[in-house]
Amino acid sequence: MNGNLKRADYHQPLHNEIEWRLNSMNLSRIEYFLAAAEYLNFTRAASVLFITQPSLSKQVALLEDELGVRLFDRRPRDLQLTPAGKLLQYEFSKLMPEIDAITEKVKRLSNEKCEMLYIGCVESVFLGEMASNIISSFSTNESDVEMFIERHSFEALQSKIINGSLDVAFTFSTQLGKMKDIMRVDIEQRRRHIIMSNKHRLASLDDVGIGDLRGETFVLHGQNDPVALCDDILDECGRLGFYPKIRYAPTVDALLDYLEFAGCIAFLDKSITEIRFGRLKYYPTVLEKPFSLICIWNKSNKNPALSKFVKYLPSE
């Protein structure tokens, strides 16, 4: 298996013990291990894999030798995962969908379509009609281009645009920061709103202002996320004589969970409520901080399919 396996931060000392061995891992061996871990029976797992039981046992033993750790407790009538085996099953189970997706993309190269375009969108954010129409029109009219759409966090989109694993991305203007060599086109302007659960104690009010948020907990998307940080709102809270408790959500989905289930308050574009329609409520804020949904790409990207896509974007 080529390339580095994507891993979460392992608990020490297992991480140090096996990290250097993962680069050369055999993909089939991983699949064999996952089957054995699922069924906890070598004979049954082997039948599902259409191989013999001795072959499966040998491959699992080779994997254990390769990693230098025991993955299974083998007993006469029982097979159980060791703590190391449970950890490896968890990590490999997350990895396999990515490998399957990559394999599918490679297989598509053998089709008659020779051009490919990778489009990224912000996770859990409603793109809106204009952006949706751009993507749809491109897909309909450029039949010679194979198009792939992925959802990622703001940070992941930036990284993938820079390293070229995405050709184009739809994100917010506040996310650009100091990114170099990035081209952009504004798609539509968005407005910041006060967002909360429709079961929140304030949700019955016709209007909610900053002063009404005294005692509330604000949730922001990451400690460095400028679209949610809202320094001006925090300054206004201080002017009114209070400072809210702040929580940071690692993903947009987690942020929405904080809103819906923990009663927190967020300051985002109201389109975010479309993801959980009927469960969130929004109010306009008098502190305007306009921003835009934008389309970005790396100007050094020479993909001909990207050049075709850019023609579908609105002109400045």
Image (spheres, rainbow, N blue to C red):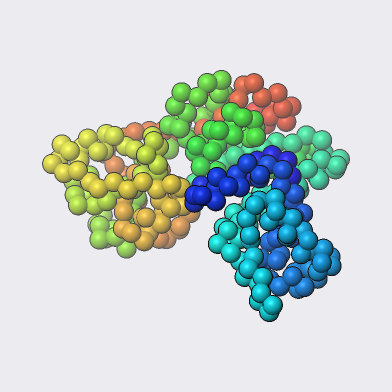
Task: Specify whether residue 186 is in view.
Answer: yes
Q: Quadrant of residue 268?
A: top left
**What residue sits 19% from the left and 49% below the top?**
214
Comparing 301 with 222, the one in front is 222
| x, y percent for residue 12 | 49, 49
Comparing 289 with 251, the one in front is 251
Q: Quadrant of the C terminus?
A: top right
**What residue sits 59% from the left and 34% below the top?**
160
| x, y percent for residue 286 | 26, 39
Outermost residue to the bottom: 77
Q: Quadrant of the N terminus?
A: top right
| x, y percent for residue 205 | 24, 57
| x, y percent for residue 46 | 79, 68
Q: Quadrant of residue 165?
A: top right
Task: Specify whether residue 7 is in view.
Answer: no
**What residue sits 54% from the left and 38% below the top?**
156
